[in-house]
Amino acid sequence: MVFIVKLNDAETDPESVFYLTKVQHGSKSRSVDLVNTSAFAAYGAGGKSTKKDYAKLDYEKVAPGVYKIIPKDLEPHMEYAFVSVAQSTSGSNSIVYLFGTN
């Protein structure tokens, strides 16, 4: 499975824009873990938490600001979500893209 993304800024590191996590299923809902950022994020620190449900990603630069993203070791028959890091820090209006594996 491969995803292609185009970022607004050609110099932006894709790892600082989003992360991939498993989707948790409730009886009538789905949820995702939001990233925990460093208390010093306002001063430029990156500090992303490492939870067990986060998936590893490989990145390949295709063109300026365009990346091929390859998720590693995804479990079959599972739903995953790409979550926007910038919006997940506040917990409101997070951008989430879901997909499933076969």
Image (cartoon, helix red, strand yellow):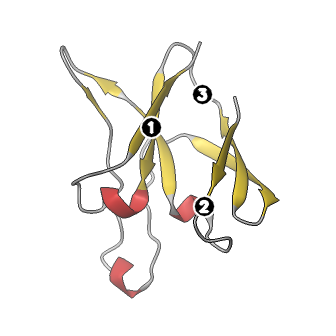
38 to the left or right of 78: left
Give the amino acid type for the residue marked by disc 1 in the picture.
Answer: Tyr
Please say if the residues under marks 1 and 3 sit with CB atoms less than 8 Å apart.
no
Q: Where is residue 35 in the image (x, y as percent from the top left)?
A: 36, 54
For this rendering, which residue is in front, 48 or 10? 10
Q: In front: 57, or 51? A: 57
The C terminus lies in quadrant? top right
Position of 7 relative to 74 (above/below): below
* Structural crowding at the residue carrying mark 2, measured as other residues with C-alpha within 10 Å and reported as few (<14), some (14–19) or many (≥20): some
Whether residue 7 is visible to the viewer of this picture, yes or no, is yes
Question: Which of disc 2 and disc 1 is earlier in sequence?
Answer: 2
Q: What element carries label 1?
A: strand
Neighbour tally class for label 1: few under 14, some 14-19, many 20 plus, Cα within 10 Å? few
Tell me the distance, in whole angstroms, between the alpha carbons under discs 2 and 3: 24 Å
**Residue 79 percent coordinates (x, y):** 45, 23
Q: Where is residue 11 in the image (x, y as percent from the top left)?
A: 67, 74
State whether residue 46 is above or below residue 22: below
Residue that mark 2 sits on: 7
Q: Is residue 70 rendered to the left or right of residue 78?
A: right
Please give the residue where the numbered disc 3 appears in the rendered image: 74
Residue matched to label 1: 97
At mark 3, the secondary structure is loop
User: Looking at the image, is mark 2 or mark 3 nearer the viewer?
Assistant: 2
Query: How many numbered marks, from 0 up?
Result: 3
Which is nearer the N-term, disc 1 or disc 3? 3
Q: Who's the residue at 49% across and 54% down the image?
A: 18
Q: What residue type is labelled 3?
A: Leu
